[in-house]
Image (cartoon, helix red, strand yellow):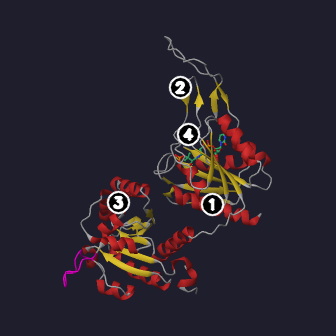
Amino acid sequence: MESGRAAHPSLEGRRILLGITGSIAAYKAAVLCRLLKTAGADVRVVMTPLAKQFITPLTMATLSKNPILVEFFDPENGAWNSHVSLGEWADCLLIAPATANTLAKMRGGVADNLLLTTYLSARCPVVVAPAMDLDMYAHAATQENLRTLADRGVKIVEPAAGELASGLVGKGRMAEPEEITAYLDSLFARREKKKTLQGKRFVVTAGATIEPIDPVRYITNHSSGKMGYAIAEELARRGAEVVLVSGRTSLPAPAGVERRDVLSADEMFDATTAAFDRADGAVMCAAVADYTPAEVSATKLKKGDGDLTLALRRTRDIAASLGACKGNRILVGFALETDHEAANAQAKLSKKNFDFVVLNSLRDAGAGFRGDTNKVTFIDRSGSEELPLMTKHDVAARIVDKIESLAAER
Ligand code: PMT
């Protein structure tokens, strides 16, 4: 069997602050701690007072080889356990198990124990592994808390479905320690990424197009640009030269990215096809209007007594045009759907000649426009891979991982 260090190389030397809350799943924290230690991580443990009822500080101190922190002050000698320096020390705060109660307090900014104050002061990535009964997990309050935390950048290792302590069967069982360890390893691996795309050029489209009706009104959509900007940023971080063709957004250009601002679908078509000439690939994330007013009135349309019908004409499909001339270059498309998701995405894959499609559905909570999270499925000619809800930055990293493997094959 592969040793912990070889299996999880990115955990070597990492400082993991393991937070344990009062759940029956706390017993799994012992195995988790041992796996992290075996992988070469330095582990310190903060427990909520209730967590001590489920697993003893002695067990966790023995496994982590560090004293356990529970109270703000050491009752023996009055020494202060500084949540600020704990937060500064950690490369990652991992709360496993995270109860519904702790998640709600994290969302609300409650600071009534050492773990919560540490969370509020932590500047490092925060990962939670929820554990609770299925109805508590499915409850709108818990789901809303998780969405808000994810929007704020907290990473969630989703619970599994199975038999729960209550005897009921459903989703709520904390992810297995092996899965959480692998998640942390890949989190650190992504942060360490080398300049693997040095020398490559990519075009990314992002944001919403604006189709004018008259000097006052226009047709647009809800895209904020966040998803496309995260992809441009990630490509640049890995060394690629990036031209970001951006529709309307309020976001600043990511560091090292050349931004070309456009308004309409026609302008986006011209800027993107021109930039694609010298590129090794493109990621089509913009929400582009499929129809634009057939005529733009030079003066403000006046209100009449009756209804108004606007004639719309089809815009040119940018992705399809790149797909027709892409040759061996990489072309990644998005599909934003509200129904028949997989079938529609498959149709776009072949019609626009994409290498793969990133499908997001407005039926999934936390997916699509505006928010900081997305839930996507990759679809290519060999099958599909469904990813859990994650931040748009994490989705971008997964998309660029896939681009990297395609680039390595060509
Ligand atoms: O910007 P955010 O608020 O972060 O939201 C992200 C997002 C929801 C906009 C993004 O994740 C997304 O789904 N982008 C694609 C939106 C879209 O228009 O999808 P579509 O299914 O209509 O288009 C299919 C593909 O063709 C897309 O890659 C699109 O960019 C491209 N297209 C469409 C029309 C057109 N005229 N030219 C194109 O290139």
Name the quadrant containing residue 65: bottom left
Asked whether, in this view, residue 215 is left or right of residue 91, the answer is right
Three-letter amino acid code at disc 1? Val
Task: Return the residue nearer the eye: 294 or 176.
Answer: 294
Residue highlighted by disc 3:
135
Secondary element type, mark 3? helix
Task: Return the residue nearer the eye: 182 or 193.
Answer: 193
Nearer the camera: disc 3 or disc 1: 1
Secondary element type, mark 1? helix
Three-letter amino acid code at disc 3? Asp
> Which comes sooner in the sequence, label 3 or label 1?
3
Q: Vertical placement of 249 versus 301: above or below?
A: below
Q: How far apart are the alpha carbons under marks 3 and 1?
A: 36 Å
Name the quadrant containing residue 151: bottom left
Residue 217 image label: 2
Q: Position of residue 43 (x, y in %)?
A: 41, 80
